[in-house]
């Protein structure tokens, strides 16, 4: 028995360890789909849709039959006395008899059914509930699009850090070999000390960039984990490569995509705002209409001078009532007129906002297409520059170690190469990010 308890205790202690060691591997598409399901902002947006659906039914239910019941118990600690002319009981005229009506205690149980027959505000409320649900769905779509873009940016930043570290470590190894070889040449009197110092300066700068990139890599992974909805220190591995994603994201056909503004989620949200103001205007107008409600009431009452309402022989008296209530607004001292005018002004503002959104989106689409086209062109240019920088650096290495080139020229060529490498990596990331931005504005992506 003791051994079983020890084994069980050991298993319980190991559970958190297993949970902490859980690792994740994502392609970019897998990361996007995972974030849509697990990102905390996306989860809240989905819950907003659920709440809107409940709100829709809540509004609908107010126009359906409502049943309420009540039980009232009264105990007169001192009953009210009434005066009755004494001559009604054979007494002298002008005199009054003190009498008490009713019993000291009574209990009444009632049930009431109410039903709206006509209410203009209820009709508007039903329409508003549907619009509110549409607003929540559009908000969820916008959230998903923004999360998709954020995942692409975060995923790309991690790949950029990884690729940068690979190149920097490769450059560091080559540069360390250069420093060692040059130091030996200096010791043998074949090279000047300045040459060693020039290369050491380059190596020092490279090591500083390497350390900075190491720290940025940690931050990039943490940002990706947060965007995915994981713990900030989760063990995450990426399966896509930066160059492969860049090739996949070069699509010149996207530049000729039609500008269908109505598909843009920001336009839909602005349109929702206009429709909401239209419904508010309807609501204000409906307040001038009459309302008609019906009700049916039924109940039982019991009376006694002591608490006998739980006894079997207690007598109960039934009653029922049916009624219709018509409420007709007549004059509000122009309050409803002012409220209607105010909402009309808000509607005009919403219409102006919709037109402004349309114009802004056209500008944003044109700008996004321009940025994407530039990113593709810049990528091709940086790729060519990198090839040239590699050739220049290689030539200067050969010249330097053959004694026909200076250390200053070599250092300049190496610095130019390192810059070209980083610019090429950034150019690849820009292609991916600018395409994601353009797809978001054009709404050409389908979110699962």
Image (cartoon, rainbow, N blue to C red):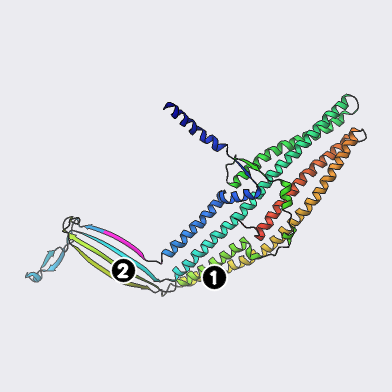
Pinpoint residue 82: horizontal percent, then vertical percent: 16, 65
Residue shown at 53%/69% (left/top)?
A: 278
Q: Name the mark on residue 118.
A: none
* In front of the other: 438 or 18: 18
Pinpoint residue 20: horizontal percent, then vertical percent: 56, 37
Which residue position holds label 2?
296
Residue shown at 82%/40% (left/top)?
A: 415
Is 361 part of what is drawn in magenta?
no
The residue segment tinted magenta is 63-71
Q: Is residue 94 left or right of residue 285?
A: left
Main SS, magenta residues: strand
Question: Which quarter of the picture shows residue 181?
Answer: top right
Residue shown at 49%/56% (left/top)?
A: 50
* In front of the other: 123 or 439: 439
Question: Which quarter of the picture shows residue 273?
Answer: bottom right
Q: Are marks 1 and 2 in contact (CB under 8 Å)?
A: no
Circle 2: is it few (<14), some (14-19), or many (20+) Cα within 10 Å? some
Q: Is residue 179 left or right of residue 359?
A: right
Pinpoint residue 165: horizontal percent, then vertical percent: 73, 39
SS category of the residue bearing label 1: helix
Quarter of the picture holding the C terminus:
bottom right
Which residue position holds label 1?
344
Pinpoint residue 200: horizontal percent, then vertical percent: 81, 32
Quarter of the picture holding the N terminus:
top left
Does residue 356 appear in the picture of this structure? no
SS category of the residue bearing label 2: strand
Q: Is residue 163 above or below residue 140?
A: above
Q: Is residue 435 left or right of residue 50?
A: right
Instruction: Mark 1 or mark 2: name the one nearer the start of the chain.
Output: 2
Q: Is residue 82 left or right of residue 417?
A: left
């Amino acid at each position: 028995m003791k051994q079983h308890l020890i084994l069980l205790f050991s298993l319980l202690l190991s559970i958190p360890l297993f949970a902490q060691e859980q690792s994740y591997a994502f392609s970019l598409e897998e990361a996007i789909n995972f974030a849509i399901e697990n990102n905390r902002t996306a989860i809240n947006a989905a819950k907003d849709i659920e709440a809107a659906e409940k709100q829709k039914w809540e509004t609908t239910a107010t126009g359906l039959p409502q049943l309420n019941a009540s039980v009232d118990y009264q105990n007169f600690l001192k009953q009210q006395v009434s005066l009755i002319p004494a001559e009604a009981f054979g007494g002298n005229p002008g005199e009054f008899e003190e009498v008490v009506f009713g019993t000291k205690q009574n209990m009444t149980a009632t049930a009431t059914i109410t039903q709206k027959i006509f209410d203009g505000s209820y009709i508007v409320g039903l329409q508003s509930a549907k619009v509110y649900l549409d607003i929540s769905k559009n908000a969820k779509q916008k959230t998903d699009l923004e999360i998709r873009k954020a995942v692409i940016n975060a995923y790309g930043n991690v790949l950029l850090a990884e690729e940068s570290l690979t190149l920097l470590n490769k450059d560091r190894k080559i540069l360390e070999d250069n420093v060692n070889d040059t130091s030996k040449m200096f010791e043998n009197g074949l090279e000047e000390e300045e040459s060693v110092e020039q290369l050491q300066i380059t190596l020092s700068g490279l090591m500083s960039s390497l350390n900075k990139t190491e720290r940025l890599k940690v931050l990039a992974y943490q940002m990706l984990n947060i965007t995915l909805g994981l713990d900030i220190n989760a063990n995450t591995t990426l399966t896509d490569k930066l160059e492969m994603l860049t090739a996949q994201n070069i699509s010149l056909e996207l530049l000729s995509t039609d500008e269908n503004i109505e598909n843009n989620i920001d336009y839909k949200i602005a349109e929702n705002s206009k429709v909401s103001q239209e419904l508010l205007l309807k609501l204000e107008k409906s307040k001038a209409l009459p309302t008609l409600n019906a009700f049916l009431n039924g109940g039982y009452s019991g009376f006694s001078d002591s608490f006998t309402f739980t006894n079997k022989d207690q007598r109960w008296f039934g009653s029922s009532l049916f009624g219709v209530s018509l409420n007709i607004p007549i004059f509000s001292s122009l309050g409803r007129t002012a409220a209607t005018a105010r909402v009309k002004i808000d509607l005009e503002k919403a219409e102006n906002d919709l037109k402004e959104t349309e114009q802004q989106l056209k500008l944003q689409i044109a700008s996004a297409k321009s940025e994407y086209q530039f990113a593709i062109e810049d990528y091709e240019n940086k790729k060519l520059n990198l090839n040239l920088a590699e050739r220049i650096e290689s030539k200067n290495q050969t010249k330097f170690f053959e004694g026909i080139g200076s250390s200053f020229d070599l250092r300049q060529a190496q610095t130019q190469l390192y810059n070209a490498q980083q610019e090429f990596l950034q150019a690849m990331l820009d292609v991916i990010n600018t395409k994601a931005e353009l797809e978001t504005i054009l709404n050409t992506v389908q979110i699962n």
